[in-house]
Image (cartoon, rainbow, N blue to C red):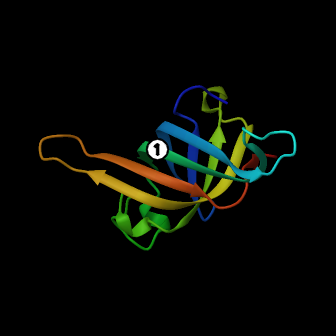
Amino acid sequence: MALNGNIIIVQLNGNTIAGTKTTEIQVESELIEIASATQGAFREYLTGRKQWQVTVNYLVMSASFASITSYPNAALTDPLFVGNQYTLKFLNRGVGYQPSGMTGTAILRTCKITATRGNLIQGTFTFVGNGALGPIGM
């Protein structure tokens, strides 16, 4: 996977609607504490279910986004799109969009917009994985 933030493509209903410039990916595993006959003073764990989420600070919108939504002036920065499900593709975009990487379905959980007069608008978008991350296979 690329080592810069330029790796995620956001799709809605099979249409590419955005790409990212900065990306934070977090994958976690549940820890289930167990009682141990050999450890009296230290805890032991089994691993449980996994979860993942992606936080991006900037989305580059596709020019065709408004035409595939029911909002003619829509942008993903619109809070109305929180709660929708998207397909995220983690691609190595530096090698001509070759089909290698990971993909998963995620729900847009948070859309935080900071708009200050005289400054550029800033935003944070958090996508929470809805199922497993898997390899892109073509």
Which residue occupies the foreground of this view, 10 or 116?
116
Which residue occupies the foreground of this view, 11 or 49?
49
User: Which residue corresponds to mark 1?
Assistant: 56
Image quarter for residue 118?
top left
Looking at the rendered structure, the kind of residue marked 1 is Val
Q: Residue furthest right?
A: 37
Position in image of residue 66 (x %, y %): 42, 63
Q: Judge whether 87 appears above or below 59 on screen.
A: below
Position in image of residue 129 (x %, y %): 62, 56
User: Can the viewer see residue 76 in this picture?
Assistant: no
Q: Judge whether 5 appears above or below 84 on screen.
A: above
Position in image of residue 31 (x %, y %): 71, 49
- Tell me what residue is drawn at x 39 percent, y 48 percent: 124
- Tell me what residue is drawn at x 80 percent, y 39 percent: 39
Which residue occupies the foreground of this view, 7 or 125?
125
Q: Residues within 10 Å of mark 1 (few under 14, many from 20)?
A: many
- Tell me what residue is drawn at x 59 percent, y 43 percent: 26
Position in image of residue 28 (x %, y %): 65, 46
Position of residue 118 in the picture relative to residue 56 (left or right): left
What is the tally of numbered marks visible in this picture? Answer: 1
